[in-house]
Image (cartoon, rainbow, N blue to C red):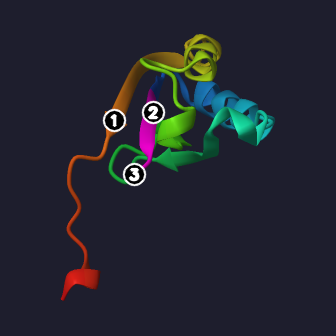
Amino acid sequence: MDIVETLQVRPFRQSDRKAAIATYNALVLPDPNEGLREIHLLQDMTLQSDLCIVLRWRPAGMPLGKSRIGVQLASVFAEFGRIDHTLWSNIGTVNHNNV
């Protein structure tokens, strides 16, 4: 089961949203041996100004607490808007494979 770290960004202005997206597009993934599988950028379907950066970690590679890269990203993206930085672990799954 992966661990998910999220950074929700509520931009101050439309220009900040565009700058946040440009900054995201310039990201380079760190060494995969650090345990980070991938990073996604999501847009809120209802409030389209809001963005969410999702870091998906292998449990063995994830440090306890918020990651160094997550804290660094939160610091960088804080210049574009309000940040909510959280860490999630899976405690249950419902899927069609059991049917």
Density class for disc 3 (Cα within 10 Å; few <14, some 14-19, many ≥20) is: few
Structural distance between the alpha carbons of marks 2 and 3: 13 Å
Q: Which residue is mark 3?
A: 1
Q: Which residue is mark 1?
A: 88
Residue 49 colored in magenta in the image: no
Which stretch did the figure color magenta?
Answer: 1-8
Q: Quadrant of residue 16?
A: top right
Frontmost residue, 42 versus 5: 5
| Residue 9 in view (yes/no) | yes
Q: Secondary structure at mark 1?
A: strand
Mark 2 or mark 1: name the one nearer the start of the chain. 2
Residue 85 drawn at (x, y percent): 41, 21
Q: Which residue is mark 2?
A: 5
Structural distance between the alpha carbons of marks 1 and 3: 11 Å
Q: Quadrant of residue 72?
A: top right
Density class for disc 1 (Cα within 10 Å; few <14, some 14-19, many ≥20) is: few
The residue mark sitting in front, 2 or 3, is 3
Q: Quadrant of residue 47?
A: top left
Q: Secondary structure at mark 3?
A: loop
Label 2 close to label 1 by CB (< 8 Å):
yes
Left or right, 38 with respect to 93, comes to right
